Structure formats: structure tokens, C-alpha cells
Amino acid sequence: MSRFLPLIAAFASACAGGDAPAPDEGPQAAEGPAFDAQRAWTHLKAQVAIGPRHSGSEGAERTREYLEEHLEAAGLTPVREAFTAVTPVGSIEFCNLYVDLPGTGGEDQPIFVIASHYDTKRLGPNFVGANDGGSSTAVLLELARVVAEGPKRPVTYRFLFLDGEEAVREQWRDPDNRYGSKYHVERIKKQGLDARVKICVLLDMVGDKDLKLTLDQYSDEDLVALFERTAKQNDLGRYVWSARMPVLDDHISFSEGLSIPVIDLIDFQYGPRNAWWHTDEDSLDKCSAESLGVTGTLVLAALPELETAYGK
Ligand SMILES: [Zn+2]
């Protein structure tokens, strides 16, 4: 991630159970499996166990293999999007990974992108990016399973695991950042899919034990309001919108490149004065399964309203 950040909201939902009819409240009750926070936590631990996962590293490849294994187990077909880009330290091999889950909308149905970067910043052998890189990737992987195993939805969902979000140099200075998202947006245009891609929901740094999503000023106002409303309706309002600040992240590639509404669900207050961000302190003990669960639940809860508002 970059030096500024975004925010988001959440939602919740108890599993249906028992005999009583569900009360008529909030967005429609989700059918299908619930978001499994413990499963997401397992995905986070697995990434941290790999170690550094910066672009072009062996750890990045092992991460892709892990993602592919679990996406395939959910019945999905991951696509690799490999490319080479020139960086301040020379050419690097990058590789995005995504799966498309077609909905019921027929040909040319809208595509909703839900994304996370999986690369970690190049900060030496002890930086494992539990929160920055690991947490949102874990949530996205579990979200892909839950949505795939649930009832068919009206739009196509693209679960996009981005490489190369992090600047290769220490400082975030264009064009040294967002390699994967910029490439992916160009590919969308070349493939003629740009008219179908309606929104991008980006997840980043969502594992902080003390989760409070940041209100990112580059995020679309209507999407911010939608997620805030969803969070409140699902008793997750306390997890959204603390600091308000501009956050530079992969969502910018989608808003600039495709002119679509985007939102960055990110908690950019990680430790006192964000002290754990981009340091070896970004470790598993600062994160929690609960925070992964809040984020996953919030995104799932927002899907019906997103489909109503943007799925035409
Ligand atoms: Zn970062």
C-alpha cells in the first residue's frame, strides 16, 4: 500500500438456523455459506509462513500456487496474467491472478471486480506483510469460496489477486507502484471488457486487531455511503470510518483507467501513528481472525445492494 489510505464498511449476518422465519430486516439474508473467519485466518497464516512475497520472488510464486490450489478446490478456474515491467531495479516478472464467477445475467453481463494485492514490499528477510498484503488476500480467497458455493448472482464477479502494488523503491513515486493493477486495466481495455466492468471494491490492510476502516478521499462517495449503511445495518458500524485521508492504492488504477466508481476498504492506522506499517512489526500477532471476519462479512452483506445499484 501506499502512504495514504482508504476505508470501508461491513456487514454481518447470522446463519439462518432454527425454525422461526427470518425477520424482515436489512438487505436480503444471504443464502449459501457464511464467511468463515477461521478459514481466512488459516490463509493468512499460510502466507506469513511463506515469508517475504515481493514481486518476482520465490515467495510470490509460492503464494500464487497456494491461491490456485484453494481456488481450484472451490471449483474455480484461476487465470494467470504474467508480464514483465521495467522498475527502478531492472526488469521484474509480475503475475496477477484472477477468477471469474459468471452470474445469471447472460452475455455481456456486468462485471464487479473485488481485488487485493498479494505482493509484499521489499523490506528484507524479516518483513512478512501479515496485514499489508496478507490480510486482504486471505479475505479475498475466502470470499471467492463463499460466493462460488452460494447461489448464482446476477452479475459476474472477478476476484482479482494483484501483484506489484508496492513501490520497488522505498518511496511511493509514480510510475513505481501499482504495476499489476495498471497492467490489468490495460488488458481489460484491450479485451473490450471495459464497458462491462462497473465497480472495483479494493481490500487492503484489513487484518488489524483494532480494525477501523479509513475514509479514503479517492473512493466514490456513493460507494462509501453504501458500505457505511451496510455496516450500520449489520451492527458493524464501529469498524468504519475513522480518519479521513487520501489513500493511494490499486483502486486508483481502476478509477483513472476505466472511469468507474471504486472504493478502498483499508485501515491505515496500524499501530500507534501507523508505526507498524512497512516495518518488521507487521506480523501475525497484530492481526486477528475477527477483523478478517468483519471485512468479509461486510463485503458479502453489501453485494445485494451493489448489484441493485450497479448491476445494470
Ligand atoms: Zn504496503
Image (spheres, helix red, strand yellow):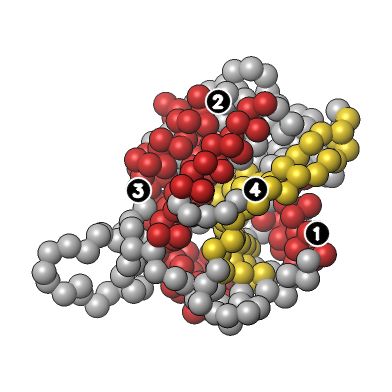
Q: Which residue is mark 1?
A: 186
| Callout 2 touching callout 4 (CB < 8 Å) | no
Q: Which residue is mark 4?
A: 97
Question: What amino acid does circle 3 point to?
Answer: Asp
Dot 4 lies on which element?
strand
- Distance Cα–Cα, label 2 vs label 4: 18 Å
- Distance Cα–Cα, label 2 vs label 3: 22 Å
Point 36% across, 45% down: residue: 37
**In this image, 121 relative to 236: left or right?**
right
- Distance Cα–Cα, label 1 vs label 2: 30 Å
Q: Which residue is mark 3?
A: 36
Dot 2 lies on which element?
helix
Q: Is residue 166 above or below residue 159?
A: above
Dot 3 lies on which element?
loop
Question: What amino acid does circle 2 point to?
Answer: Ile
How many badges with numbers are in the image? 4
Label whose residue precedes the other's in the sequence (2 or 3)? 3
Question: What amino acid does circle 4 point to?
Answer: Leu
Label whose residue precedes the other's in the sequence (2 or 4)? 2
Circle 4 Cα neighbour tier, 10 Å, few/some/many (<14 / 14–19 / ≥20): many
Quarter holding the C terminus?
Answer: bottom right
Q: Is residue 28 above or below residue 36?
A: below
